[in-house]
Image (spheres, grey):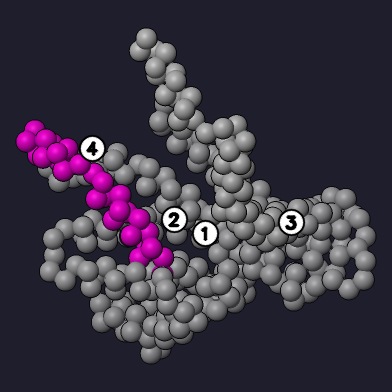
Amino acid sequence: MTTTAERSASSAAAPPPRRRSRLRLRNTLLGWSFILPNFIGFVLLTLIPVVTVFYMSLTNWNIFGSSQFLGLDNFIKLAGDKSFHTAFLNTLYFAVMHIPLTIVVSLGLAMLLNSKLRGVAFFRTAAFFPYITSIVAIALVWNLLFSPQYGPVNQVLGFLGIQSPPGWLTSSDWAMPAVVVVETWRRMGYYMVLFLAGLQTVPRELHEAARTDGANVVQRFFNVTLPALRPTMFFVTVMLTIESLKVLDLIIVLTDGGPGQSTTVIAQFIWTKGFEENQFGYASAASVVLFALCLVVTIIQFAWNKRRED
């Protein structure tokens, strides 16, 4: 009797089929209204340009006139292009130095500013400030700091007893390390915020338990903090890798690829071939190589992270 009463109440509460259909249609249209603007933007600004680049990489289009299909000729030419080889190696050189340095600096900064210091909000803001500063202003200031004759950096090195400090941005050996230092300084605030958010999710009970067991600060860092930060560390590493492989703006305003080709990277090679020499087909082929490099490295990182999780 109770079951019959419940069914009667349920059928009385349920809307009629026509009303349910209109409600489902309204919810569907509401959902599409939320995702459609983003989807249209993705198709127009990302998907279509990427597909177009893949097609252009197989042509000799120079923006003037029609294009001619070349097949894989652009990629074969890239394989023998010494300028591209230099840009490729410089990109890897930059990434190998920039990724670990930025992780160490931003994580150290986050751990320092995660403690209860007086004025910690001010220091967090100050650390984030370079990330939102104009890239032109950054290049101007660091050019003055790295000046071989009058820059404060070399004056400090001379005060410390170094007789022949490097020429930094004017030296083919030291230009790339100088660019890495500037890029690390510029990005550390952003990744500090990410690590800071990760650190605040680490349970205090774990640190207290480890401290009770006699673990010192170093042991607690490697056995408690770092394992708890693994998701944040994975995200930061993936983002840093992609940003390092496609770095362009800082190098253009700071060194313009020089001295010689000592700081020329793949993104600048693409810019030069496409927008200065109008070889859009050849530049598109280099873009496809850069895309493949980012994709392969990201897949390896995801596979390594999944293996660690298993």
Q: Position of residue 280 (x, y in %)?
A: 79, 66
Instruction: Give 203 or 83, whichever is nearer the viewer.
Output: 203
Q: Earlier in the sequence, mark 3 or mark 2?
A: 3
Residue type for callout 2? Ile
Please name the amino acid that badge 1 sits on.
Answer: Ser
Q: Are marks 4 and 3 in contact (CB under 8 Å)?
A: no
Whether residue 178 can be seen here? yes
Q: Which residue is mark 4?
A: 223
Labels 3, 1: front one: 3
Q: Are marks 2 and 1 in contact (CB under 8 Å)?
A: yes
x then y, percent, for residue 58: 84, 54
SS label for mark 1? helix
Quarter of the rendering occupied by the C terminus: top left
Question: Could you give the CA–CA distance between mark 2 and mark 4, rounded to whole angstroms?
Answer: 22 Å
Q: Which residue is mark 3?
A: 48
> Local crowd at mark 2 within 10 Å, few (<14), some, or many (≥20)?
many
Q: Give the extent of the magenta segment.
A: 186-215
Position of 308 relative to 245 (above/below): above
Q: Which residue is mark 1?
A: 244
Q: Amino acid at mark 4?
A: Asn
Where, by quadrant of the figure, is residue 159 drawn? bottom left
Percent position of residue 236, x then y: 42, 51
